Structure formats: C-alpha cells, structure tokens
C-alpha cells in the first residue's frame, strides 16, 4: 500500500517494497503542496512555475540535479530502453521508459491514466510506465517487463512494481470502445458486463 509523506510542503506517495531496495529512489507526485494545485505540467511546458515545481519535487525526493529522461506520451505501446541521457534534453515519443543508468530519473505524467513504477530487487534497472486504456489494451506493462527480462536477463520474479494513483470505477466511466479494445469485458465494470 502506498504511503503518503509530506516533504518540504509537498505530498508524495511511496511504495515500501520499492523503498526497501538499496539504491532505488522513487515517488508518485500529488497535487498537494501549499495549495492543492501543485502541478509538474506537460513535458514541454515553458511555464516558470512548472519548472520550479519540478525542481522542488526532485529536491523533495532527494533527486535534485538528476537528469530526467522525458517521454512525449502518445497512449502507445512504445517502450524505450535508455542507455544514454539524450532524452533529458529532448523528449522522445513513447509510454514507457527503462534505464540501468545510475543517478538518472525516468518519469511519466498522468492525470487519470495508471502510473506504474518497476525496479528489480538488485537495483540494476528501473522503469516508469504510462498506462492509459489504449496502452493497457496494447499490453504496455507486459511489453515493458518483457523488454527488461530480455535486455537485462532479469527474472520476472525479481521485479517489483508499484501502481500509483489513478481514476477508478467510482469516478471514471468508459465507453464500449474501451471494453472492446481491452478484449476482456470482465476487467471493466460496465452496463454490458453487469448481471
């Protein structure tokens, strides 16, 4: 279960299983700071307040000055395995980021989509996944794990994943196109699947 922590007036969420891995730094941001409108903005924001919020967030989670590998998220199944820091200056299109580089941050941004953080028990590799319904339908989480397993010879049993805050059944309604795309009507609570 995620734990809420208040650091420098910023509320972050962390997963104890990931926190227990030496060398892994992680957090899910929230909109809570001095005011309930703390935003890290879109990847290409030029708003000075967004840049300041990003710097404050990174400092709060002890990642100040770390390069952040950026994605231009497109609700796809594209997984990038970053072996250098070029994406720190120019976002690349995709919805999952993997890296084994120490001292590098990977991140994704969500509103109602599902954020997933993954790390192996030996802190060799980390990943951040943006799983919207299109990504879920195209198996973005599975493809990210598969790429980690194949590229780094890590057993899936050695991976720990944390699912961050996202919209739930109580506050998000989906249409038939989502049920059809996911190919598993029992996974979605819809009028068609209710008895």
Image: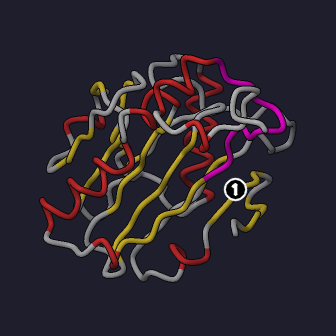
Percent x, y for residue 46? 51, 16
On the rendered image, what quadrant is the C terminus found in? top right
| Colouring of the image | secondary structure
Count of numbered labels shown in the rendering: 1
Return the residue nearer the eye: 115 or 50.
115
Q: Which residues are magenta?
A: 164-175
Residue placed at 63% from the left, 58% from the top?
Answer: 60
Image check: 82 left or right of 164?
A: left
Return the residue nearer the eye: 187 or 74.
187
Q: Is residue 159 above or below residue 37?
A: below
Residue 162: quadrant of the picture: bottom right
Image check: 148 left or right of 166?
A: left
Residue placed at 13% from the left, 61% from the top?
Answer: 150
Return the residue nearer the eye: 38 or 152.
152
On the rendered image, what quadrant is the N terminus found in? bottom right
Residue farthest along the front direction in this orientation: 195
Q: Is residue 43 above or below residue 21?
A: above
Magenta stretch secondary structure, dominant: loop
Residue 153: quadrant of the picture: bottom left
Image check: 182 left or right of 165?
A: left
Residue placed at 72% from the left, 37% from the top?
Answer: 189
Return the residue nearer the eye: 17 or 90.
17
Image check: 2 left or right of 118?
A: right
Crowdedness of circle 1 by 10 Å Cα count: few (<14), some, many (20+)?
many
Q: Is residue 53 above or below residue 160?
A: above
Q: Is residue 9 above or below residue 50?
A: below
Secondary-structure class at tag 1: strand
Residue picked out by circle 1: 12
Percent x, y for residue 13? 68, 59
Percent x, y for residue 142? 34, 51
Percent x, y for residue 84? 16, 47
Residue farthest along the right direction in this orientation: 35
């Amino acid at each position: 279960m995620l734990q809420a922590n208040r650091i420098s007036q910023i509320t972050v969420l962390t997963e104890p299983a990931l926190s227990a891995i030496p060398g892994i730094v992680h957090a899910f941001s929230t909109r809570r700071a001095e005011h309930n409108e703390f935003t890290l903005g879109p990847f290409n924001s030029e708003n000075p307040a967004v840049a300041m919020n990003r710097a404050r967030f990174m400092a709060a989670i002890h990642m100040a000055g770390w390069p952040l590998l950026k994605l231009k998220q497109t609700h796809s199944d594209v997984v990038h395995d970053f072996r250098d820091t070029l994406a720190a200056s120019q976002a690349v299109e995709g919805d999952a980021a993997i890296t084994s580089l120490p001292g590098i941050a990977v991140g994704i941004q969500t509103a109602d989509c599902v954020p997933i953080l993954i790390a192996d028990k030996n802190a060799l590799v980390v990943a951040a996944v943006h799983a919207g319904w299109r990504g879920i339908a195209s198996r973005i989480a599975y493809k990210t794990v598969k790429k980690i397993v194949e590229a780094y010879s890590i057993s899936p049993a050695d991976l720990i994943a944390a699912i961050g805050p996202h919209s739930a059944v109580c506050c998000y309604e989906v249409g038939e196109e989502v049920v059809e795309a996911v190919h598993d009507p029992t996974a979605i609570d819809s009028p068609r699947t209710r008895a």
